[in-house]
Amino acid sequence: MLPEKIVFAVDIGPECAERCGSSSSMNRLTAARQTIKRFIQLKRWMSPMHEFAIMTFAHTTFWHCEFGQSPDQLDKAVDEIHQADYETADYYDLLSLFEAV
């Protein structure tokens, strides 16, 4: 299996604090963090050569964690993803995400 480079793009705007469904106590950001961690775990099990990076976006795009991090550093970086502290614009220009990648 060839090594893959995978980028997670995580929306940290105000809506990430909303609950996941009507019966869940978990918010969207917590669900995203858990899903990212599980995905990384499974991909590394298949091949430890895979690399991961994390970008966050709300008003602007930001490299939260670049490629080449150790599993512990990557796990810590996922835990450190938090909701943006500022109000976002009415829209987000997705082109900035693609330009950053």
Image (cartoon, rainbow, N blue to C red):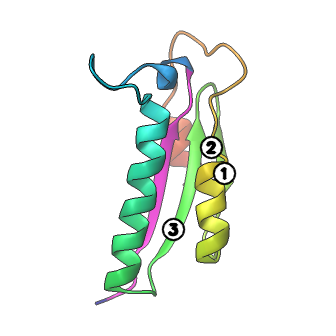
Give the left or right position of residue 99, taking residue 38 as reference: right
Kindly indicate whether the residue at mark 2 contacts the one at mark 1 (C-beta within 8 angstroms).
yes
| Side (left or right) of 101 relative to 65 | left
- x 39%, y 25%: residue: 25
The mark nearer the N terminus, 2 or 3, is 3
Image: 55 above or below 68: above
Q: Which mark is residue 52?
A: 3
Q: Earlier in the sequence, mark 1 or mark 2?
A: 1
View extreme (right): residue: 85
Circle 1 packing at 10 Å, graded few (<14), some (14-19), many (20+), is: some
Kind of residue at badge 1: His
Q: Nearer the viewer, residue 71 or 96?
A: 71
Gap in Å between the C-alphas at discs 1 and 2? 8 Å
Coordinates of residue 11 in the picture (x, y in percent): 50, 34
Which label was assigned to residue 64? 1
Tell me, yes or no, whether the highlighted magenta stretch contains residue 46.
no
Image quadrant of residue 68? bottom right
In the figure, is residue 14 to the left or right of 63?
A: left
**Can you tell which mark lies on residue 81?**
2
Q: Position of residue 95 (x, y in %)?
A: 49, 36
Identified by mark 3, the residue type is Phe
User: Which is in the foreground here, disc 1 or disc 2?
Assistant: 2
> What kind of element bears circle 2?
loop
Give the crowd class for mark 3: few <14, some 14-19, many >=20 residues within 10 Å: many
Q: Secondary structure at mark 1?
A: strand
Magenta-colored span: 2-13
Badge 3 marks a residue whose secondary structure is: strand
Q: Quadrant of the N terminus?
A: bottom left
Q: CA distance from mark 3 to mark 1?
A: 11 Å
Residue 32, located in which quarter of the rendered image? top left
**Which quarter of the figure is the C terminus placed in?**
bottom right
Residue 8 drawn above or below residue 32: below
